[in-house]
Image: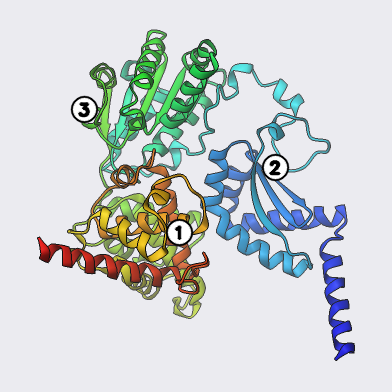
Amino acid sequence: MESRSSSSASSTSTARHAQGSLRSDDHAQLLDRLRGLFSREVGEERFDRFFGNRARLLVNGRTLDVTVANGFMRDLLERRFGCDLRRVLREESAAAGCELELRFRVDGKAFDEPTTAPAPNVGPSRSARSRVPRRARPSGRGMEPVQRLEDFVVGDANRIAFAAAQRLAEGEDGAACTPLFVHGACGLGKTHLLQGAANRYRQLNPRGRVLYLTAEVFTNEFVSAVQGGSMNAFRKMYRNVDLLCIDDVHFVAGKEATQNELLHTLDAIGMGRARIMLASDSHPRDIRKFNEALVSRLVSGAVVRLDPPDVELRARIIDRLARRRQLPLAHGACRLIAEHCVPEGAFASVRDVEGVLMQVEAVWKLLPELSAADGSIGSIIVQHALDMRKQGVSSMPKGSRRPVQIETILSVVCDELEVQLNEVLGPGRHRRVVLARSMAYYLARELTTRSYPEIAQAMARPSHSSVVSAYTRISKQMAEGKTVQVGSRHDGLTLSALADRLADEVRRRSHVSGRGS
């Protein structure tokens, strides 16, 4: 026994030593391999677009750091590629004898300082940047737009909005339709159009000053400027632009001072014949707590609505997404997914389409024996994925979904996970509170007809984007079979099982409440 223990301890020590003793050239070789594997996993075009000059990859001890310039890019890369990159990293690092973890970091200074040695895909050096005209660089503290107009799938539901965004970005008379206000429900492509217009204008006008941001960022910057006595710098940053794109404009509802500043900003930009594009979930006149002056300014230009995609457009979107993800869909599979990705008569968004396609991809990878003879994804895999998606909470009868109130969901979640309501509605980040909040979002989305903004408002969230990201994240964790590990009596249950249990209790309480009334 002592000999075996000694041998085991020795081998463990050796493994640990090997894990922590990679030489710099080993790091370089491993990083090169990982780049190639990541590129093949997510697609070469997508890898180059998102990691080409917007992110730096570096093996740092036992961590693979993905460094980006801002929180927007960190959240975007984590959401879109985190799962795939971690899977590739686990497989490759295990083969190399070093257990590496993936970490997304924000370091704006890393993109301002010169690199000590040339490396692929790490962005331009200072000398290269110095040759770029000053006005070509992103101005202010806006976000870096990553979407492109050429990637937007156009159909009857969005044709007018796309044409308006294209004219604003490309046409010499683009300022004539400013401000362009695009509105529609979540997941229909508003952000894509804003970012695409910003990128297209920048391509055609390399010396132009383009600023893309959310209304939340604008609000935070305005408050900081007021508190710090730097309003002159704030106004110079936001009003000295050629194209201003602001997403989620409804965020400033009820914020009178911010609305006034936004109104003055739009007026100042408009007087200079600059171009303005804004987006919101609702028509300006339907946004509550908007002052009349701002509403009047927003409707003075072109107001265009995005409608939910019909079956034909959904099929084309599925085909485009499948090609990007390198999924070999067989003939007719796109149509089958498009027709059944949402219940009959229900609202369909692009995010619904993406969710079903992710489920199809999971079934294809986990059950390859269901593939067609040529290895493609046929109707068997698609139907299997659709059936899996209907199981549990999402398959509840419509009659049981309608009467559910968010207050009931919050009550059940707080009782079952033993947290306080003020914790769920507050900013706390304890693991159990985060799980409770995510479950409440998920159940509200699945058991009610509330939209993301309505759920955010009911749960005291400042923006619906946090609801969207939490819902997407927990849905993905359910599909992966993740379990509860938060120090509660539910630990060990899968997230799907917990959601089912919570949903059953919500339905029971709703039924009892309905009988009592």
Indicate which disc residue 435 carries: 1
Determine which of the numbered discs, if any, sits on residue 175 in the image: none
Badge 1 element: helix
Residue 319 seen from this side: no
For the residue carrying disc 2, how many other residues have a C-alpha within 10 Å: few (<14), some (14-19), or many (20+)?
A: some
* Amino acid type, callout 1: Leu
Where disc 3 sits, the SS reads: helix
Which class describes the residues within 10 Å of circle 3: few (<14), some (14-19), or many (20+)? Answer: some
Q: Give the left or right position of residue 394, taking residue 237 as reference.
A: left
Q: Nearer the viewer, mark 2 or mark 3?
A: 3
Mark 3 is on which residue type? Arg
CA–CA distance between discs 2 and 3?
46 Å
Secondary structure under badge 2? loop
351 or 505, nearer to the observer: 505
Q: Which mark is residue 285?
A: 3
Residue annotated with mark 2 = 121
Image coordinates of residue 201 in percent, x first then y, are 48, 25
In the displayed structure, 170 sits above or below 359; it is: above
Residue at left 65%, top 44%? 105
